[in-house]
């Protein structure tokens, strides 16, 4: 199993939180389209691509053996 670790700058953290807010609004208001969510995610990834401070590292998690 893999786990991600986010190291984001202030702008990156704000954009990441905006994704959560947009998804929550979409869940609450089923009639709206996903266009707002798409735009927020697109903005987040564009920022991450150009920002030197924002990095995501992946690490493998050891799975406990079932007895």
Image (tube, rainbow, N blue to C red):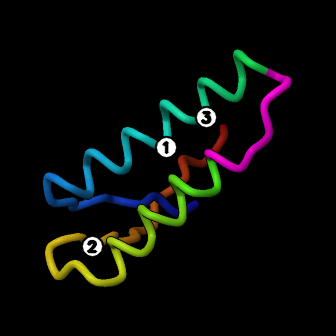
Q: Earlier in the sequence, mark 3 or mark 2?
A: 3
| Pointer 2 local density, CA inside 10 Å: few below 14, some 14–19, many at least 20 | some
The residue tagged with tag 1: helix, strand or loop? Answer: helix
Q: Mark 3 points at which residue?
A: 23
x and y percent of residue 15 in the render? 35, 50
Cβ atoms at labels 3 and 2 below 8 Å apart? no
x and y percent of residue 31 in the render? 85, 24
Q: Name the residue under label 2.
A: 55
- Is 34 magenta? The answer is yes
The residue tagged with tag 3: helix, strand or loop? Answer: helix
User: Image quarter for residue 22?
Assistant: top right
**Height in image: 32 above or below 29?**
below
Quick check: 50 left or right of 24?
Answer: left
- Is 15 magenta? The answer is no
Q: Name the residue under label 1.
A: 19
Per the rendered image, the range of residues in magenta is: 30-36
Question: Residue shown at 74%/19% (left/top)?
Answer: 29
């Amino acid at each position: 199993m893999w786990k991600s670790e986010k190291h984001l700058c202030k702008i990156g953290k704000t954009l990441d939180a905006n994704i959560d807010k947009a998804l929550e609004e979409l869940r609450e208001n089923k009639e709206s389209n996903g266009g707002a969510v798409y735009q927020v995610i697109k903005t987040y990834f564009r920022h991450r691509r150009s920002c030197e401070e924002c990095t995501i590292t992946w690490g493998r998690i050891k799975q406990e053996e079932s007895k």
